[in-house]
Amino acid sequence: MHMNYKSLLRFFGSSADGVPPLRNTPAHQTATTTDTLTAAQMLGEVLTVDQGSSSTTTQTTLTGTQLTAAFAGRVSVGDSFNLYIINIDVTAGTNLVLAMGTGITLIGNNDVEEEDAVDNSSSALFRFRNTSATTWDCYRLA
């Protein structure tokens, strides 16, 4: 494959004309009631959750083994991906708890509060880092 100078700059994350590089991002995934997340929901980068209830719900991650399998053999120790979760429910008390499946260790807080006018803390950023064929760490980054 032949690439010109501008194509190479764009490929490596720079732009000669001052326009920031773009990347293709999948459409956001959705969830509602308490459930175990699917591979598509976890790997889709952005997950919006609207519980449609008046209580806290729990979304559980895949197990470490299932998460590794979702990458079809293309994951190594140290590889990671991010998952942004946005709780779009506006009903008071409809917090979302992200529970860890077997083989995933949480580092930080797993509560994502409802969207409200008081503190607007309705989103969270989690980074999942592979630690073995059957285990992952999940860091709450924001």
Image: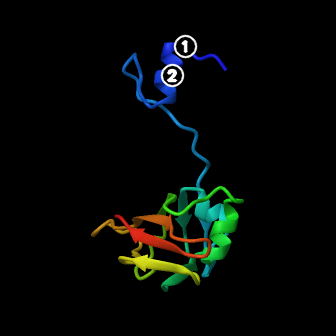
Q: Say which element carries label 1.
A: loop
Which residue appears at 41% of the width and 73% of the height? 114
Q: Label 1 neighbourhood size at 10 Å, few (<14), some (14-19), many (20+)? A: few
The residue that mark 1 highlights is 4
Q: Residue 8 carries which label?
A: 2
User: Is the residue 113 above or below the residue 46 in the image?
Assistant: below
Q: In this view, does 42 lie to the left or right of 140?
A: right
Amino acid on which disc 2 is placed: Leu
User: Is the residue 17 above or below the residue 141 in the image?
Assistant: above
Q: In which quarter of the image is the N terminus?
A: top right
Cβ–Cβ under 8 Å for marks 2 and 1: yes
Percent x, y of residue 109: 36, 78
Which residue appears at 36% of the width and 64% of the height? 141
Total count of labels: 2
Which residue appears at 39% of the width and 74% of the height? 113
Nearer to us in this view, 90 or 37 = 37
Q: Quadrant of the C terminus?
A: bottom left
Percent x, y of residue 77: 53, 63
